[in-house]
Amino acid sequence: MSSPNPQPPGQPRFERELIEKEIEHLKNRKSVRHAQEVQRGWSKMLIAAAVLGFLWLYLMDIVLFSYNRGDAIRVYLYLHNYGDDQKASAVANSGLLTPDEVAQLNRRQGSFQDFYNGTEAAEKKAGELIDYMNQVHALHNHHYDSLSTVNKVRYVLFMDTGLIPPTHWDALNSSIDK
């Protein structure tokens, strides 16, 4: 006679009560297995976010300098040709452009009116660029009182510990020939 559910020889026999008990255990959201996995998942995400935040705070000037440099080229060309030369000189002296690049931009010919809708917008952008570079200079020259909140955090994390954040990478900088 054969049984309804034949077991292969050498396999342990499972009782239905044990299987149902295990299924109920897995359905329970507060089971030990589920709670440990969720806790480990959140801790890994928090550690990854902290590491990425730390890296961003350290390397943010590299990205922001390159981005603002492109704007500084346009602002300088616009203000030098159509606006306030003093504001253009302030952008040039902020550190976003080298003296050689300023000399090249002064010789550049073209229509730069499409860069901004009037000198007011260009002067506003020039003010933002100058403020950004003032913050970078204040951070690197240890002027803690004049720093923004983010730069105060960066100062404590990096400048106090001797790990000085870089200001720019030439490979990321936009060319003045565009």
Image (cartoon, rainbow, N blue to C red):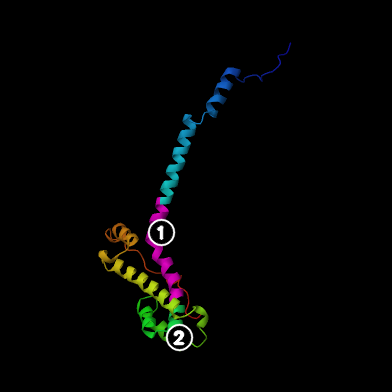
Q: Report which quarter residue 13 is drawn in.
A: top right
Image marks 1 and 2: residues in contact by CB distance under 8 Å: no
1 vs 2, front mark: 2
Quadrant of res 3? top right
Mark 1 — residue? 56
Q: Is residue 86 above or below residue 48?
A: below
Q: Amino acid at mark 2?
A: Tyr
Q: Give the prevailing secondary structure in the magenta stretch.
A: helix
Q: Residue at x 43, y 71 (%)?
A: 68
Residue 60 in the magenta stretch? The answer is: yes
Label at residue 122: none
Magenta segment: 50-72
**At x 29% / y 61%, what residue is drawn?**
159
Quadrant occupied by the N terminus = top right
Q: Amino acid type of disc 1?
A: Trp
Q: CA distance from mark 1 to mark 2?
A: 37 Å
Q: Position of residue 4 (x, y in %)?
A: 71, 16
Which residue in the structure is indicated by mark 2? Answer: 82
Residue shown at the point (38%, 55%) measured from the top left: 54
Q: Residue furthest top?
A: 1
Mark count? 2
Judge whether residue 33 can be spotted in this image.
yes
Q: Is residue 79 left or right of residue 140?
A: right
Q: Secondary structure at mark 2?
A: helix
